[in-house]
C-alpha cells in the first residue's frame, strides 16, 4: 500500500552512491560511480537449487547478456516503468522500440520483439522475458494497456519459478 511505496521511495539511491548490481553500465552512462565487484557480491542473495541447497554462482564473462548481468529489483522496476511510459521520454522511446518489430515465435499466441516475448491471450497483451542461472530464476513483464508491470527475482531455481508468479499477478489484476 501507500506505506510500502513510501518505504521504497525512501530507499532509492542517491546519485552519488555506488550502484550495486547489474546496472553498472547504465550507471556509467549517467555518470554514477559503479560498485566494486566485492561490494556487488556482498549484496547478492545466495542461490539455491530445486532441493533448496545452496549453489555456486555462475560467472559468464564471454556472454554477459545470457545470465552474467546482476541487477536489483529496483533497477528492473525502473526499466519496466520506462516500458509503461513513465520516466525520461528519450529512454521510453528506446524501450518501446524494442517490442515494435515483431516476429512469430514457435508457440501459438506468442511473438518475439528484440528478445522480449509478447503473449496475447483473451485480448490481453503481456510483454515479458525470463531467465535463470544456477540458483536463480527471474521474470519481468508489463501490460501497457493496463499500465501494470511485474518483476519477480528468486534465489531458488525451483520450478515453476518466477514465470508462474508473474503471470499469476497479471491474471489477478
Image (cartoon, helix red, strand yellow):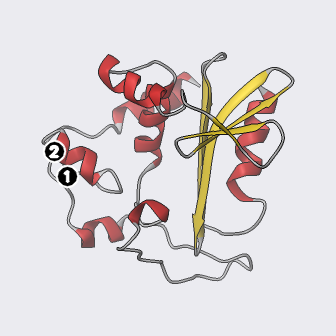
Tell me the quarter of the image containing the C terminus: top right
Q: Is residue 43 left or right of residue 73?
A: left
Q: Secondary structure beneath disc 2?
A: loop
Q: Is residue 67 left or right of residue 166?
A: left
Residue 96 picture location, percent across and down? 47, 26
Whether residue 138 is visible, yes or no, is no
Mark 1: give few (<14), some (14-19) or many (20+) Cα within 10 Å. some
Give the label on residue 27, or none.
none
Please name whichever residue, 10 or 134, is drawn nearer the observer in this view of the structure. Answer: 134
Residue 84 picture location, percent across and down? 52, 22
Labels 2 and 1 touching (C-beta < 8 A): yes
Estimate the spatial distance between the alpha carbons at disc 2 and disc 1, rounded to whole Å: 7 Å
- Tell me what residue is drawn at x 59 percent, y 73 percent: 135
Residue 126 picture location, percent across and down? 69, 31
Judged by depth in the image, the label closer to the viewer, 2 or 1, is 2
- Tell me what residue is drawn at x 59 percent, y 25 percent: 1
Against 119, is 132 above or below?
A: below
Q: Which badge, 2 or 1, is on the more N-terminal residue?
A: 1
Whether residue 85 is visible, yes or no, is yes
- Tell me what residue is drawn at x 73 percent, y 68 percent: 158
Mark 2: give few (<14), some (14-19) or many (20+) Cα within 10 Å. some
Give the label on residue 32, or none.
2
Against 97, is 76 above or below?
A: below
In the picture of the structure, the residue carrying the numbered disc 1 is: 18
Q: Secondary structure beneath disc 1?
A: loop
Residue 9 picture location, percent across and down? 38, 30
Amino acid at each position: 500500500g501507500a506505506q510500502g511505496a513510501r518505504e521504497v521511495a525512501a530507499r532509492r539511491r542517491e546519485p552519488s552512491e555506488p550502484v550495486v548490481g547489474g546496472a553498472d553500465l547504465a550507471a556509467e552512462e549517467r555518470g554514477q560511480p559503479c560498485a566494486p565487484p566485492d561490494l556487488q557480491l556482498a549484496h547478492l542473495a545466495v542461490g539455491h537449487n530445486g532441493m533448496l541447497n545452496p549453489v555456486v554462482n555462475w560467472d559468464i564473462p564471454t556472454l554477459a547478456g545470457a545470465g552474467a548481468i546482476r541487477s536489483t529489483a529496483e533497477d528492473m522496476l525502473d526499466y519496466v516503468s520506462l516500458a509503461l511510459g513513465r520516466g525520461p521520454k528519450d529512454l521510453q522511446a528506446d524501450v518501446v522500440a524494442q517490442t515494435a518489430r515483431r516476429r512469430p515465435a514457435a508457440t501459438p499466441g506468442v511473438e518475439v520483439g528484440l528478445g522480449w516475448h509478447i503473449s496475447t491471450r483473451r485480448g490481453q497483451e503481456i510483454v515479458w522475458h525470463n531467465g535463470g542461472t544456477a540458483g536463480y530464476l527471474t521474470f519481468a513483464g508489463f501490460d501497457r494497456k493496463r499500465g501494470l508491470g511485474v518483476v519477480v527475482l528468486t534465489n531458488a531455481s525451483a520450478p515453476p519459478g518466477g514465470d508462474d508468479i508473474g503471470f499469476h499477478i497479471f491474471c489477478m489484476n
